[in-house]
Image: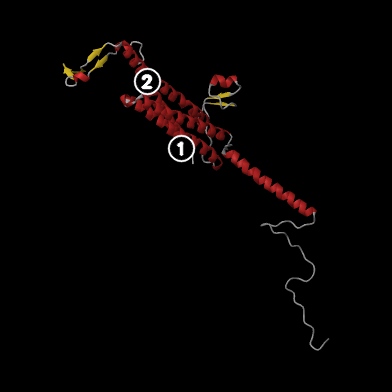
């Protein structure tokens, strides 16, 4: 079951994950843009044939390793290869952008339930200006329900489920970004498509689950200690009033009041008392 401590810890975890994702996404985006998507990128490329120089291909001069090959002047082929490289890294940039954008849907809702900000009056809006424009009240900070109250258990269950799923999904997103960085040369077009399909699935599941849990949490009432006390007092008062009405109706009908434990009063019965014995007639008399 979710509780106040786990909810707060999960908020910290998800915040750290979001920061890590944005950091590595920024680093990769800068690398791709400066290295592969620069307009001058194609002019720095040369086509090299090296299969005929296998014995001499790798050379080292003045401590610098180089690759030896035969330059080939084929502009059309060179442009085709260049376009393929640019498209590949553009697809990577698009994937990174999708991952970054996906972080906000769940996090906005989790923050709205646990710490703020939230648009009170229109909780599906997560922009301050839009909130005020639509008549809502923008609350930068809120206090989550009391986790010591048993009546709040279901609310914490919904939030805990949302956080657990979100953190697992974001952790996987971070792993994918690490793959793009650490295994750059191993990410082919086919591998990139497989990764993109996985990301789409993660986002779809995240969005669906967070939307459902958020709505359930919003419609689940929570209570303060004072509200719980008042609720119990109201229930007790209702019971007492119901008992009083029942007693009044029984009295009006001439019935005995119901005793403690649900037993009805027996009253004074007429006739022979319980346990009285009658004398037998003397012998010989008829």
- The answer to whether residue 63 is seen in the rendering is no
Could you say which quadrant of the image residue 14 lies in? Answer: top left
x, y percent for residue 18:
42, 27
Residue drawn where x is 73% and y is 71% of the image: 274
Dot 1: few (<14), some (14–19), or many (≥20) neighbours within 10 Å?
Answer: some
Q: Position of residue 145 (x, y in %)?
A: 53, 35
Secondary element at image label 2: helix
Residue appearing at x 46%, y 37% in the figure? 6
Q: Which residue is mark 2?
A: 88
Disc 1: which residue: 6
In this rendering, position of residue 9 left or right of residue 262: left
Image location (x, y in percent) of residue 51: 22, 20
- What colour scheme does the image use? secondary structure
Residue that sits furthest to the right in the current view: 286
In the rendered image, residue 149, in percent from the top left (x then y), is placed at 54, 41
Name above or below for residue 166 compared with residue 70.
below
The answer to whether the residue labelled 1 contacts the one labelled 2, judged by CB atoms less than 8 Å apart, is no
Q: Earlier in the sequence, mark 1 or mark 2?
A: 1
């Amino acid at each position: 079951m979710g509780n106040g401590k786990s909810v707060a810890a999960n908020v910290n975890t998800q915040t750290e994950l979001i920061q890590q994702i944005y950091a590595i996404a920024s680093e990769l985006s800068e690398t791709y843009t400066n290295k592969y998507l620069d307009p001058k990128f194609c002019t720095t490329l040369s086509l090299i044939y090296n299969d005929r120089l296998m014995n001499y291909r790798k050379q080292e001069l003045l401590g610098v390793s180089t690759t030896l090959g035969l330059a080939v002047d084929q502009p059309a082929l060179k442009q085709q290869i260049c376009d393929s490289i640019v498209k590949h890294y553009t697809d990577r940039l698009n994937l990174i952008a999708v991952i970054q954008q996906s972080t906000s849907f769940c996090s906005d809702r989790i923050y709205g339930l646990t710490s703020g900000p939230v648009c009170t009056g229109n909780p599906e809006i997560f922009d301050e200006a839009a909130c005020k424009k639509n008549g809502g009240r923008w609350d930068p900070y809120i206090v989550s329900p009391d986790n010591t109250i048993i009546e709040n258990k279901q609310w914490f269950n919904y939030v805990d489920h949302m956080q657990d799923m979100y953190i697992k999904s974001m952790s996987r997103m971070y792993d994918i970004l690490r793959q793009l960085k650490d295994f750059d040369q191993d990410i082919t077009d086919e591998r990139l498509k497989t990764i993109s399909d996985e990301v789409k699935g993660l986002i779809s599941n995240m969005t669906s689950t967070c939307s459902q849990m958020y709505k359930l949490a919003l419609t689940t009432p929570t209570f303060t200690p004072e509200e719980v006390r008042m609720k119990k007092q109201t229930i007790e008062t209702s019971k007492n009033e119901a008992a009083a009405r029942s007693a009044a109706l029984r009295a009006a009908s001439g019935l005995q009041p119901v005793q403690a434990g649900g037993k009805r009063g027996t009253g004074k019965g007429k006739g022979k008392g319980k346990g009285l014995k009658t004398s037998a007639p003397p012998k010989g008399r008829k």
